[in-house]
Image (tube, rainbow, N blue to C red):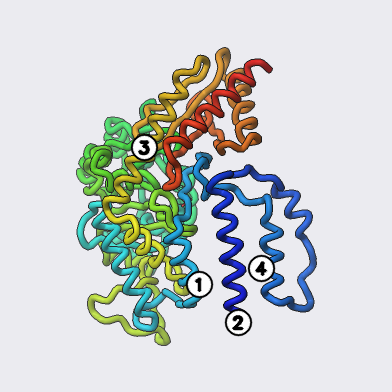
Amino acid sequence: MTELDDLLQSAKDHALAYREAVAVDPKPIARDYHTIRDSLMAAVPELGAPPAEVIEELVAIAEGGLMPIAGPRFFGWVMGSSHPAGVAADWLVAAWGQNAGYHTPTPAVAAIEELAERWLVELLDLPVGSSVGFTTGATVANGVCLAAARTGTLLQAGWDPDADGLFGAPPVQVLIGADAHSSLFSSLQLIGFGYNRVTKIDTDAEGRMLPAALERAIGKAAGPKIVIAQAGQINTGCFDPFAEIVAIGKAHGAWVHVDGAFGLWARAAPGLKHLTAGIEGCDSWCTDGHKWLQVPYDSGFAIVRDRAIHQRAMTQWSSYLPTIGQGDRVPSAFVPELSRRARGVPVWALIKTLGRQGIADLVARNCAQARRFAERLAREPGLRIMNDVVLNQVIVNFGSGSAAERKALTEAVIARVQADGVLFAGGAQWRDDWVMRLSVISAVTTDADIDVSADAIIAVWRGVQKG
Ligand SMILES: *Cc1c(COP(=O)(O)O)cnc(C)c1O
């Protein structure tokens, strides 16, 4: 056997053992970050070691320190399950060693990514011809879309931000819902807009942007404008009223962007699509592959209606790079990277494996499971569902008394649930309350997992009340 054969066999055996174990017994973290870090830190090795030993050591280091995100009862954050089809496709991507930045030197992966682009636009029912940049995640995808928005709005105002930067440019007004995801502020920081230089638009109890508040604020804003809306609020799962937001944005010449890191996938499920009505009128959309599509990390999509603007905001060119034919799609022209792995390949593999029907069923199933979770929990006294469960997110507050007393109880429940390890759930602040967050977004979660998890939470809650 060759060395590669040995290594891949060993990696496969370990990977398989892990996935089989996590599927039936998604154990909580046994060795925490500090323990692992302290046991691991050492000087740079002077001499190398046989790779087979390195892989064995890697497995030993990770033992007890892997979060069961690929397991069936991980509801902690909005994270997909790294589907086997994507894992296998990614192994080939690594083995092929293709640098996916350009199309002609690496034709197979470039063509696959181009097809994945088309399929994504079709599945999400966005305007035909929209471009997709394959990024590491939604944070970067939001940044890419906002960079395109910066180019688009400033060119219209007679300024070229790509050539001349932002110093001296007409100020761009950014209007963003008050319950936007934190990552958007890091995207705004990165593209030179600043995370504080925004106008926050009031939202309703679920976190939906109020059109009347947008109308008032945008009326006062002069110059180029960007409106940032949201499909799928991180705690409640709610959707902004896109038809109204687009109408207001367009009436004021704004670029309208949507952060739809997970919620955009509601568009792929016929029974949920109404939640996104009007979203097709926006100018850019971001979503993730490593959330609902179950692609392994890392996978995000920056989708822009105006292909030319998207490319203009991202393109680099040098004499040593291949020339670009008319109509050719260059993978690096839609992301802020040149060399990268062929991120479109596992995306292609997942769409091919699930099909339109499988994706629709998965999204609908997870949402039905979230409702099931909420209904089961709501029957227990002292426990309150704090959101309108329209998608896959359920937030729960425990106990009575002041917000501080309820926070202490809710934190106690979360800590015990995490220690017991039947399921994983985290916490967050929502309005005045600390809540347990449950995100149902895994292809391996069954209805039975929901029932087992709800019963485990209820048992912990009863125990916490006894003290
Ligand atoms: C997860 C998420 C993000 C950030 O996405 P990453 O893939 O983690 O970079 C942004 N917005 C929303 C609504 C999210 O759920």
Kindly identify which numbered label has been placed on residue 94. 1
Would you say the residues marked 2 and 3 are in contact, meaning their CB atoms lie under 8 Å apart? no
Q: Amino acid at mark 2?
A: Met
Kindly identify which numbered label has been placed on residue 6. none
Mark 3 or mark 4: which comes first in sequence?
A: 4
Does the Cβ of the disc 2 residue fall within 8 Å of ligand 1?
no
| Residue located at (39% from left, 35% from top) | 369
| Residue located at (38% from left, 58% from top) | 301
Does the Cβ of the disc 3 residue fall within 8 Å of ligand 1?
no
Q: Amino acid at mark 1?
A: Ala
Would you say the residues marked 4 and 2 are in contact, meaning their CB atoms lie under 8 Å apart? no
Mark 4 or mark 2: which comes first in sequence?
A: 2
Q: Quadrant of residue 14?
A: bottom right
Residue position marked by numbered label 4 in the rendering: 55
Foreground: disc 2 or disc 1 = 2
Q: Considering the numbered disc 3 on the image, is that residue within a helix, a strand or a loop? A: helix
Q: Amino acid at mark 3?
A: Cys
| Residue located at (39% from left, 71% from top) | 332
| Residue located at (61% from left, 22% from top) | 409
Residue position marked by numbered label 2 in the rendering: 1
Mark 2 or mark 3: which comes first in sequence?
A: 2
- Residue 56 appears in the picture as rendered: yes
Foreground: disc 1 or disc 4 = 4
Q: Considering the numbered disc 2 on the image, is that residue within a helix, a strand or a loop? A: loop
Q: CA distance from mark 1 to mark 4?
A: 16 Å
Residue position marked by numbered label 3 in the rendering: 367
Q: CA distance from mark 4 to mark 2?
A: 17 Å
Residue 345 vs 243, above or below: the answer is below
Q: Considering the numbered disc 4 on the image, is that residue within a helix, a strand or a loop? A: helix
